[in-house]
Each structure stands twice: as structure tokens, then as C-alpha cells.
Amino acid sequence: MCGIVGLLGKTAEIRESLGGRLTPMFTCMAARGPDSGGLAVFNRPLDDSIRRYSVYSPDRNQDWDGLGQLLRNHLSSDSLSTDKASKIPDFQIRAIENHATIIGNFDTLDLTEEISRFCPALHVLSVGRSIEVYKDAGEPAEIARRFRFDSLSGTHCVGHTRMATESAVTPAHSHPFTGGEDFCLVHNGSLSNPYMLRRKLEREGLQFETDNDTEAACRYIQWKLDIGATLEEALHQAFVELDGFYTFLMATHNQLTLVRDAFACKPAVVAETEDYVAVASEFRSLAHLPNVSDANIFEPEPEEIYSWPV
Amino acid sequence: MASVEEDIVMDLARQSLRDVNRFLHENGSSLSGKHVRILNPAGNHSVAVGLNETMTVQIDGHVGYYAAGMNRLSTVTIAGNAGCGVAENMMSGTVHVRGNASTCAGASAHGGQLFIDGNAASRCGISLKGGDIVVGGDVSTLSGFMAQAGRIVICGDAGPGLGDSLYEAVIYLRGEHRGLGADACEEPMSDEDYDLLQKLLVAAGTNYDPQQFKRIASARTLYHWNADRDQEY
């Protein structure tokens, strides 16, 4: 099973209350995926030079202030900079329990690499000017409560509740998965050739964080994007190269995109009104949305690409 | 809103699904001939499954999976859309979906009638064993897959792989299809086909002319193993 949910706000009112609208959709789909839960929320992109890193700590009592100070010391150390004064990045940390968002001007510095060297226990969940990812293993409703999903605002978001069938239940194996910047993917289904994809991508120099099949799909699509394909082109190639069952819900900074495999046996329902586009594995997840009775409700066709711009 | 004296109103916003279904099962004979309305289904699964009396049930809204599954004798109307497997394994009676139906509508139904006013998604009438299905709109991919008996009437168009590996069920298609499945073929309509189709169309409340339909049935080439095909079909 697994549940997927997504919401794109077309009005300021929906965008301001995005998390509040999304949370009941998400917790409803916990029935399909009680193991783990995660959410990617997108906001208007920050300035070109600014990056937003979502960081996960296995320690629920993580001392984020201390980490910020240590990080400042580390980033200003001689090993990183010959001209300390001009190169110490200015950043701020917003933390909630074992999740933090680090926003700053890191110039050409790869903070993911620095964090993995400096504090290997931490895990960077997403990088971009727009995306922020929260995920963890555990009961989805509790995850939503811990990370206060209902207080989030944004232009669009993508959520997932997981029932693991092919790899371990860990925070890193939970969805959404991210590849490069400002792209994420959630998956309901299971792939038959993830190891083949993975070997292909590893030969191209890509690195994997888990043995999860969805990560293979996410990195495959990201790889196509990185070598110049549009998301639509990447997905047409994915239809050929990916074997297995999938409903994928993806987002970039400016679009929400949904596809199902050729057999379309993993469910998805879309409800679109003038105010929002909502996607879920089952209609009951959408039943509480405003004016849903007047929405255009449909199921996506197999191997059709459905995209909605922000 | 109990507009008629016989109306029994149940509200899924206030009663649990299990209580509603238990009421419909345990009061079977006393509900015979009665009209039951179910409010606020809110996409719940398994609403009004396993009914076994000649009652009529109207569900006011969209339902989730397996609504009116295993139906026997009852007439169930869904004033909304239905999720996967509406009227699956129906034995007799009538299930009428006023909106669209998701995948596997009427799967394995042994008897009865399933009417869908809107579209039906993939695998409509999969493994049908004797019921009749009338879809007012289109059906998606692989509809009628391995259907053994009964009729599937499609007033709109059909997706790819229509009637793949059919046994003795017959499909009547008014619109176009995007490819027949393995072993499905178009056959001439007989007078018997026209009569039967007319009755089904009237029962479903549509007024299409049976002359507009074509008949799709099994070419029966898969009935016997053919080693020379080398498993290529």
C-alpha cells in the first residue's frame, strides 16, 4: 500500500493554510501507510544565492544552537577558507525537535558535504531555494503533530505515508525522496528493476543513500533533469526504463506532477477547483476539502502526465 | 430528511460504518421493501456491502472501495462517484452509480445489474461471471479482462486492451476502442443481440439506439494450448 497526498493552492487563502488543509488528508492516509510519514512543502523561491537545507537528527533532543555555533566555527576554520572574514556564510537555523531548516548564503559551499563530514549523525533531507522536507519513521499522525504540519504555509506540498514492502523502515527510507535541488518524489507501488537502475546510475557517478526502490526512481528522474531533460521528457523515458508498479507524485518549485504506470493499479484521485488541486490515493482523504462536492474529480489515466503549474 | 414515511435515514457522520452495515444485515427481513438513505459517506470503504434483501438503498455522496459489494436482491443507488470494485461479486439486484466508477467496477459479478452513468476506470467487468454492466460513458484500459459470462455495454469509448482473454462474456461498444485485447474480435450483431441490448439500455435509463453498437466477443483461439505460438500472443 502506502498513501500519497498533495495539495497545490491557487489562492492566497489556501496557501496560507496549506498545512492545515493537508494534515487531515495526510493522517487519513495513515491507514494505507502506518510505518513512516513525510512531507515536502514548497514556498516561493528564495534569492538566487540563498539555499534552504532541511536537516534531520536521530536525536530528538538535538542541540541545534550548539550545532549552529560548531558549524560556524567549522565553516570559518582554516581548512575551508583562506580568507575567513569574507567567506564565513551568514545563516540561520529554525529548528523543531529533531528537524532543522538552515537558510543562508553558502555561495559555492556544499553544506550537505560539510554536514556529512562535520556531523555525520545528521542527514540532509533536501536542498533548494523552495523546498523543505520533513520525514521520520513512526505513526504519521504523530509525525504531523511533532513537526506541526498544520502550521505550515506554502504554494504546494507533497506527502507520503509508508507501508514498507521492499526495504527497511528507517527515517532515511521514508518518503519524500529528493535528488538535486527543489525536486521531490513520493511513490505508491514497488519497482521491479531498482537495482538495474541503480547500477546504471552509479556508473554515471550518482551516489545512493539507501537501498530503497523509490530512491532509484527519484535519482533516475533527477539525473535526466540534470542532463537537460524537462520533467515531462524525463517521465517519458521513465515509462520505458522503469519496470514495476507506481503512482508517482512529484514537485518542483513551480509544478506538481502526477503519473501512474501502464497498469495503473496503484490508486490516485484528483480533485480540482478554482482554489486548489488536491491529489490523494483515496477520495476519503479529500472529502473534507472546501467545496469538494463541486470539484472536478477524476482518476489519472495510465502513462499520462498530469502537471499543474504553481 | 425522511421525505417518505418508509424512509430510514442513516448518517455516516454520526454512526460508524460497522453500525450502519450491521443494521442493514441484521434487520434484513424487516427492511424488505423499505427505502434506506445513507448520508455523508465521505469516501468510506465498504458502504452497504453484503446486502441480502429486497430493500432499496440510496447513498448520498461519493463512496470508497467495494461499495455494494456482494449485493444480493437489493437495489443500491450511489448518488456520487464510487471507488475501486463497486458491486464486486454481486449476485443479483441492481447497483446504480450516478457518477463515475473507479477501477474493477463489477469485478467477478455473478448476476444482477450494474449501471454507471459516468465513466468507468480500468478493468471494468474484470472476470465477470454473469452480471450485466452498462456504462454511460467511457471505460479505461483492459476492461472486460477474462470475463466469463454476462454482458458489458459501453455507451462511450474504450481504452486499450478491451476484452483481453475473454471467455463467453459479450461486450457491446457504441464508441471507439483504442485496441482490442488478445483474442477479442468484433462479430456481427444478431437480432437477439439487438433485443437484449435494447432491454439493457432501457433498464439503465439511457436512450441510445442499439443499432449504434458493435459486438465484441472471444475469437476462442486461446481456449486450447497452441505450442506453436511459443507463448507469443
Image (spheres, rainbow, N blue to C red):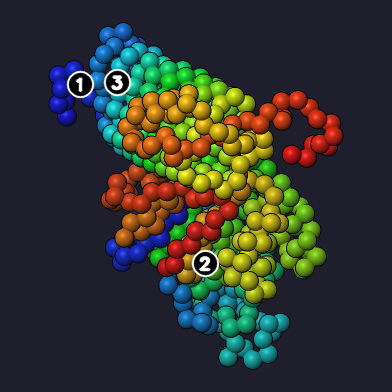
Would you say B160 lies left or right of B67 here? right
Determine the image quadrant of residue B42.
Answer: top left
Coordinates of residue A158 in the picture (x, y in percent): 48, 56
The residue lying at 35 percent from left, 18 percent from top is B74
- Chain at tag 2: A
Label 3 close to label 2 by CB (< 8 Å): no
**SS under mark 1:** loop
**SS under mark 3:** strand
Q: Label 3, on which residue? A: B56
Q: Nearer the viewer, residue B19 or A282?
A: A282
Image vertical order of residue B73 relative to residue B83, above or below: above
Q: Of circles 1 and 2, which is in front? A: 1
Determine the image quadrant of residue B216.
Answer: top right
The amino acid beneath tag 2 is Thr
Confirm whether residue A304 shows in the render: yes
Q: Residue B211, labelled with which disc?
A: none
Coordinates of residue A44 in the picture (x, y in percent): 42, 72
N-term mark: 1 or 3: 1
Q: Of circles 1 and 3, which is in front? A: 3
Q: Label 1, on which residue? A: B7
Image vertical order of residue A177 relative to residue B164, above or below: below
Q: CA distance from mark 1 to mark 3?
A: 10 Å
The residue lying at 35 percent from left, 59 percent from top is A276
Coordinates of residue B171 in the picture (x, y in percent): 52, 33
Q: Label 2, on which residue? A: A252
Coordinates of residue A36 in the picture (x, y in percent): 55, 46
